[in-house]
Image: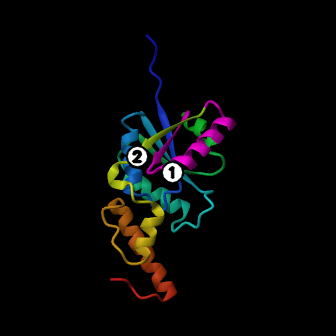
Amino acid sequence: MAQRVERAAVYPGTFDPFTNGHLSIVRRGLEVFDRVVVAVAMDSGKNPLFSLEERVDMIRETFRGQHRVEVEGFSGLLVDYVPGKGANTILRGLRAVSDFEYEFQMALMNRKIKPSIHTVFMMTDYRWLYISSTIIKDVARLGGSIEGLVPENILHRVRRRMDERRAVTGEPARP
């Protein structure tokens, strides 16, 4: 009888911060794959709220004790990173048609560069359709509640970082 091959997927992103939408994709990905590697991108072209190390630490804390989830930072081309993790699949979450257009382009480019790497798209849970890391940061920066939109350990880190920024800029604390 043939030995079963582990099915692993790499779920890449900036994750600044990691949201409950991201969490949902990882949990649902584990229903399809034996292992999911959350690959936190260093080279995103964005201005992150948290350093790469902070983002990796927060996500690791979120998945503490879940041995089927690995979390690490990476840089460079994703298609070069994926095989090193024992995977041939990129897992991507989609919220809307606009996400699909961008993700479809990226999937085709990745396939052009390395045809052995596949991309699997997973629709986000309807509860998280409207959130993104950018929206989470904007709401938190303006003093709104992000409770229930990010894992609890990350909620406290976002609040603390916003308080630190307000202290530096002299901006008054939000209610």
Is the C terminus in the top left, top right, bottom left or bottom right quadrant?
Answer: bottom left
> Is there any visible trace of residue 57 in the rendered image?
yes
Q: Is residue 107 left or right of residue 168?
A: right
* Residue at mark 2: 25
Residue at the spot of label 1? 99
Nearest the camera: 56 or 9? 9
From what the image shows, is residue 109 above or below residue 7?
below
Residue at the extreme front of the image, as rendered:
97
Amino acid beneath label 2: Ile
Residue 57 placed where, x, y %? 46, 58
Residue in the picture at 44% in, 66% down: 135
Where residue 96 appears, x then y in whole percent?
Answer: 45, 51
Identify the amino acid type marked 1.
Asp
Q: Which label belongs to residue 128? A: none
Q: Nearer the viewer, residue 116 or 103?
A: 103
Q: Residue at x 51, y 86 (%)?
A: 169
Quarter holding residue 48:
bottom right
Q: Which residues are magenta?
A: 88-116
From the viewer's side, name the closer residue of 161 and 26: 26
> Please, which residue is most extreme toward the right here?
113
